[in-house]
């Protein structure tokens, strides 16, 4: 079969699976750049200042996925892969008084975290009072007037409608079996599917997030360290001829 020259200008779609079970975790097809970097250095026995005998060190490598459009689940790869359905976070909202001296507080507010302020004075002009059973009661009833709005700050505890990914030192990233799928075009403009198999990829825990109102949309780069699997597989490159 004659050799046909080919070229690539197509970012990979990424099929990510649990390395221990091969269960699909995420199919990611919105990356802007995917890379694979492999190195294998050597050490040498020297004789009179010249290299005489080479000893090869094991291969090492990294792979990256850079994207500006990605699902929330993408972040979970950098921790233990668990997405929780409960979360707590701060809330600031305007609440209108319908009963003199009292503000009705949403049921998800955590007791001990509810504070009320005059409108426009959040964090400064605090209204003295107590919180119990979803009601904030002013110490001086005249401080909260019917029909007026007040700024309320509290910590909400949600058990539905939220997804949470936790980053901490007790949650370590899993290893993944990853297929990076692209196509190559030959000199006759025929496209050939092409796969790069990463047998055991461990996400690095270092990453950077940025949010800005100017310039390009935020970009996230995830880097994987490439390891050998239990059968000593490292990386395969597969061209699909059919």
Image: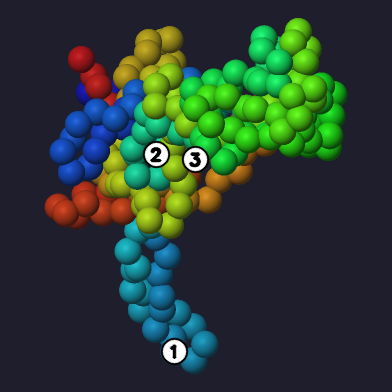
Select label 2 or label 3 by which is in front.
2
Q: Residues within 10 Å of mark 2 (few under 14, many from 20)?
A: many
Residue drawn at the location 39% of the way across and 22% of the way down? 160
From where the camera sits, is residue 13 visible? Answer: no
Judging by the rendered image, the residue that carries numbered circle 3 is 222
Q: Label 2 vs label 3: CA separation?
A: 9 Å
Residue 195 in picture, x, y percent from top left: 31, 29
Q: Looking at the image, which residue sits at the far bottom? A: 48
Closer to the chain start, of discs 1 and 3, is: 1
Q: Taking 140 as reference, is 5 left or right? A: left
Residue 142 in picture, x, y percent from top left: 80, 22
Q: How many marks?
A: 3
The answer to whether the residues at label 2 and label 3 have Cβ atoms under 8 Å apart is: yes
Residue drawn at the location 16% of the way across and 54% of the way down? 230
Q: Secondary structure at mark 2?
A: loop
Q: Label 2 vs label 1: CA separation?
A: 48 Å
Residue 55 in picture, x, y percent from top left: 33, 74
**In-front residue for pair 220/152:** 152
Residue 6 in picture, x, y percent from top left: 42, 23
**In-front residue for pair 85/14:** 85
Q: Secondary structure at mark 3?
A: strand
Q: Label 1 vs label 3: CA separation?
A: 43 Å
Q: Residues within 10 Å of mark 1 (few under 14, many from 20)?
A: few
Instruction: In the rendered structure, find residue 47 and report the number of the disc placed on it.
Output: 1
The answer to whether the residues at label 1 and label 3 have Cβ atoms under 8 Å apart is: no
Closer to the chain start, of discs 2 and 1, is: 1
Judging by the rendered image, the residue that carries numbered circle 2 is 77
């Amino acid at each position: 079969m004659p050799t046909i020259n080919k070229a690539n200008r197509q970012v990979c779609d990424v099929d990510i699976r649990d390395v221990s079970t091969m269960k699909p975790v995420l199919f990611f097809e919105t990356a802007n750049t995917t890379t694979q970097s492999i190195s294998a250095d050597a050490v040498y026995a020297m004789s009179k200042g010249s290299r005489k005998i080479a000893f090869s060190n094991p291969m090492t490598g990294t792979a990256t996925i850079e994207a500006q459009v990605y699902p929330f689940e993408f972040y979970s790869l950098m921790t233990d892969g668990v997405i929780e359905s409960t979360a707590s976070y701060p809330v600031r909202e305007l609440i209108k008084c319908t009963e003199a001296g009292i503000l009705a507080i949403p049921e998800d507010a955590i007791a001990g975290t509810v504070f009320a302020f005059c409108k426009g004075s959040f964090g400064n002009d605090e209204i003295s009072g107590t919180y119990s059973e979803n009601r904030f009661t002013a110490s001086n009833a005249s401080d909260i007037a019917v029909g007026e709005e007040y700024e309320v700050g509290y910590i909400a505890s949600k058990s539905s409608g939220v997804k949470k990914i936790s980053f901490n030192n007790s949650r370590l990233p899993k290893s993944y079996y990853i297929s990076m799928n692209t196509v190559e075009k030959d000199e006759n403009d025929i496209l050939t599917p092409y796969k790069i198999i990463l047998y055991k990829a461990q996400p690095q825990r270092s990453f950077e997030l940025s949010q800005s109102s100017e310039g390009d949309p935020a970009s996230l780069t995830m880097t994987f360290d490439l390891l050998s699997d239990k059968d000593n597989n490292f990386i395969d490159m597969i061209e699909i001829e059919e």
